[in-house]
Amino acid sequence: MRTHAPDLFRFTSVLGISALVLTSCGGNGTDEGDAAADTDTASDNTDDNTAEDATGELTVWVDAERADDLADAASDFEDDTGIAVTLVQQDFEEVRDQFVSQVPTGEGPDIAVGAHDWLGVLVTNGVVAPVELGDAAEDFEDVAVEAWTYEGQVYGVPISIENIALLRNADLVDQAPGSFDEMIELGEEADASYPFLVGLDAQTADPYHLYPFQMSFGAPVFGQNEDGSYNAEELMIGNEGGTAFAEWLSEQGEAGVLNTNIDGDLARENFIDGESPFLLTGPWNVPAAEEAGINVEVDAIPPAGDEEAQPFAGVQGFFLSAQSENTLAATTFLVDYVGSPEVQQSLYEVGGRAPALTEAFEAAMADDDIVAGFGEVGAEAVPMPAIPEMGAVWDYWGASQAAIINGEGDPAGLWDQMAEDIAEATE
């Protein structure tokens, strides 16, 4: 795979070709003699940069799933620029904490793979630097760039968008529901064991999966600033819409539609066995359903309230170390290679997640009805809040949802107490 030709870059000197190394350990990847390129010198379009100072090598932390595809991009980059790229395989779940601990010591990478909702921790710890997308920002899906924007600055090049949607067994129900009540009615008419399924936990319910319904009552967790960023000082979860949502949760729990004794595994198994026409889940459960012979359709999530049922979007990408000594080269690799249609398409093919780059996103949508279904829902999703205050929300939120569904108290009172606890914890 070749993503670029050498004449895209104007070098006054080109280093000899260095070996691409795929290893399980590594450090910053820059020598003392490497020329540093300050973040401020990166222009709005890296194609217009003169890469005189971008010499040496780059170290990139990548998970095993994406290593092979990124190796092709790294090889192209090295061929084009003479700058070696060392890929270091890391467990995705450990990247954030390892990055925070190693970057201040000078042992971290120049670039690392990660999730957008890590940004609050990464930015407040001073370990990431903004990435100058410039005009290239317009080439990505809006939700992807919004997710990687923190306090007005973009901190990564997004590669994939992931969200939940409604899976429908088309052999049981042949139409997409327009509302939650209609979905339950269609499910009951299908004479299945369960009109609708979503995996819940007995102690913590599942705020992530239930959030679209909460949003349909007009009760986001936080308000948003004009630039789309979340405002921790504007806690909205306890508004009138939140109280209405709590009452709705109680009603669904009493009716048995929401059941905390049915976890994610049981919900998936019952859907696969044809025991329900509807399952609220993500693309990760589609392969098992298709292998079981389920005629799967992907629908928009039907609203329970008067507004749209918007799920959270999780956007993965690659971010730049604040301690990188080769910022210009790293930015070029991120924007022009990781952000290229070829690489984005290739990463989509191995991961199955909708690409963040619009050109690759549209190609994937045209090629796969399942991806198209999730992609259409994801395009209208809201980024999961990346602000540090979100960490104080989950426990109170989930425990209160479970208590309300299980009928353990007055729903409005439980919800109000939750909002007060969150407000105190996020002060």
Image: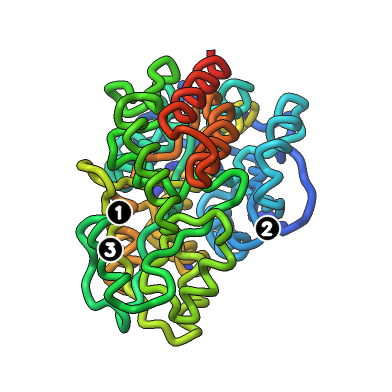
Q: Mark 1 or mark 3: which comes first in sequence?
A: 3
Q: Secondary structure at mark 2?
A: loop
The location of residue 212, given as percent across then percent down, is 36, 46
Q: Residue at x 46, y 47 (%)?
A: 314
**Which residue is disc 1 drawn over?**
358
Q: Residues within 10 Å of mark 2 (few under 14, many from 20)?
A: some
Q: Residue at x 34, y 52 (%)?
A: 378
Q: Is 125 positioned to the left or the right of 221 in the image? A: right
Q: Secondary structure at mark 3?
A: helix
Q: Are marks 1 and 3 in contact (CB under 8 Å)?
A: no
Q: Mark 1 or mark 2: which comes first in sequence?
A: 2
Q: Mark 2 or mark 3: which comes first in sequence?
A: 2
Q: Please tell me whether mark 1 or mark 3 is closer to you in this view.
A: 3
**Which residue is disc 3 drawn over?**
183
Q: Amino acid at mark 2?
A: Leu
- Res 60 label: none
Alpha carbon of mark 1 to alpha carbon of mark 3: how far? Answer: 31 Å
Alpha carbon of mark 2 to alpha carbon of mark 3: how far? Answer: 53 Å
Residue sitting at the far top: 427
Q: Secondary structure at mark 1?
A: helix
Q: Please tell me whether mark 2 or mark 3 is closer to you in this view.
A: 3
Q: Residues within 10 Å of mark 3 (few under 14, many from 20)?
A: many
Q: Is 73 positioned to the left or the right of 102 in the image? A: left
The location of residue 229, given as percent across then percent down, is 37, 26
Instruction: Give the colour scheme of this rendering.
Output: rainbow
Q: Residue at x 49, y 32 (%)?
A: 386
**Which residue is disc 2 drawn over?**
20
Q: Is residue 4 visible?
A: no
Q: Is residue 79 above or below residue 325?
A: below
How many numbered dots are placed on residues in this image? 3
The location of residue 119, given as percent across then percent down, is 53, 32
Q: Residue at x 26, y 70 (%)?
A: 186
